[in-house]
């Protein structure tokens, strides 16, 4: 009888301890879910330190700051053209992302910049390199390689690689395969081109132009000033208010703004800058009608 009683007492204590454990664990889960604030960004491979910041962002018409993302947007007149300049500082390289029309890769998939940005929960976005209007050029987005054939250079074969740490590098498709770049940690490869600034110097010559483009156009460019500090630029063009920029003038602008590396993305009717739910520029897709053009991809800032 005494042995049975001791056994029952021991079992009772175990049950009580287990019940206390369950109560404490449930309390922690509730606190973790509803009380403990956090704003954490992790690297794409799950390694490295987490980055914490403000729980609520501070947002104005032309700025955003939540501790991890800091964006300041300004406009200036350059060569009779309105130019939108976004100064972007990030706490973690994984916040710089690419978005695809329909969330898929394909020549016939197209969607406006604002729609892709909103679906991905972006804070800020510009149009990408519109890979879908051509069959040439490497395409790698968010670490996934979609197009890699070595005989598909377009038209320069001069690509922008964004690495895992957020650094920029200009590469030539004749010198390296897309698979090699992916294996080395490339997160994005854009192949529209050309490079505008290389090592702080203008990388194009006066009069140089992309395929099928006018001398002055709406433009989109992306550049890096220092680690995790970027410049994203869109210019208006083809309107009575804004003439548009030449490729050379765009390159000069990116250099003068302090970019060490800068790259030309798709321009013309594709050029779009979107911030906090609004298109800021005047896309000229349909001649005199100001409206967004559908396209294959965007570059955006978001979690």
Image (tube, rainbow, N blue to C red):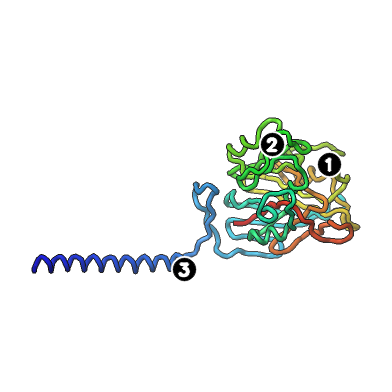
Nearest to the observer: residue 103 or residue 64 = 103
| Disc with the residue nearer the chain's start (2 vs 3) | 3
Label 2: how many Cα within 10 Å (few below 14, some 14–19, many 20+): some
Decide: marks 2, 1 in contact (CB < 8 A)?
no
Quarter where residue 149 is shown: top right
Nearest to the observer: residue 25 or residue 166 = 25
- 293 vs 141, left or right, is right
Q: Which residue does the numbered mark 3 point to in the structure image?
A: 35
Query: At which x and y percent is residue 94?
Result: 59, 50
Position of the C terminus by quadrant: bottom right
Q: Disc 2 vs disc 3: which is toward the camera?
A: 2
Quarter where residue 160 is shown: top right
Which disc number belongs to residue 149? 2
Distance Cα–Cα, label 2 vs label 1: 21 Å
Query: At which x and y percent is residue 231?
Result: 70, 49
Quarter where residue 110 is shown: bottom right
Which disc number belongs to residue 211? 1
Nearest to the observer: residue 82 or residue 99 = 99
- 13 vs 104, left or right, is left
Q: Disc 3 vs disc 1: which is toward the camera?
A: 1
SS at badge 3: loop
| Disc with the residue nearer the chain's start (2 vs 1) | 2
| Disc with the residue nearer the chain's start (3 vs 1) | 3
């Amino acid at each position: 009888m005494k042995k049975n009683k001791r056994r029952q007492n021991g079992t009772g204590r175990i049950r009580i301890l287990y019940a206390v454990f369950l109560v404490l664990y449930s309390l922690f889960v509730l606190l973790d879910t509803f009380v403990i604030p956090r704003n954490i960004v992790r690297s794409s491979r799950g390694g490295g330190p987490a980055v914490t910041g403000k729980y609520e962002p501070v947002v104005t018409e032309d700025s955003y700051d939540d501790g991890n993302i800091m964006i300041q947007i300004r406009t200036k007149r350059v060569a009779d053209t309105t130019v939108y300049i976004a100064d972007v500082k990030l706490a973690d390289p994984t916040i710089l992302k690419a978005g695809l029309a329909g969330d898929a890769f394909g020549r016939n998939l197209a969607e406006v910049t604002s729609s892709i940005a909103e679906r991905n929960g972006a804070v800020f976005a510009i149009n990408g390199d519109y890979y879908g209007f051509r069959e040439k050029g490497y395409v790698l987005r968010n670490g996934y390689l979609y197009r890699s054939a070595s005989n598909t250079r377009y038209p320069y074969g001069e690509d922008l690689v964004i690495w895992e740490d957020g650094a920029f590098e200009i590469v030539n498709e004749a010198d390296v395969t897309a698979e090699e770049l992916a294996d080395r940690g490339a997160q994005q490869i854009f192949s529209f081109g050309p490079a505008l600034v290389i090592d702080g110097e203008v990388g194009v010559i006066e009069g140089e132009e992309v395929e099928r483009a006018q001398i002055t156009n709406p433009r989109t460019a992306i550049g890096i000033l220092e680690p995790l500090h970027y410049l994203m630029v869109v210019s208006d063009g083809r309107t009575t208010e804004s003439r548009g920029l030449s490729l050379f003038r765009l390159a000069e602008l990116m250099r003068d703004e302090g970019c060490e590396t800068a790259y030309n993305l798709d321009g013309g009717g594709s050029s779009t800058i979107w911030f906090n739910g609004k298109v800021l520029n005047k896309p000229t897709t349909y001649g005199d009608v100001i409206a967004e053009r559908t396209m294959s991809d965007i570059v955006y800032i978001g979690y």
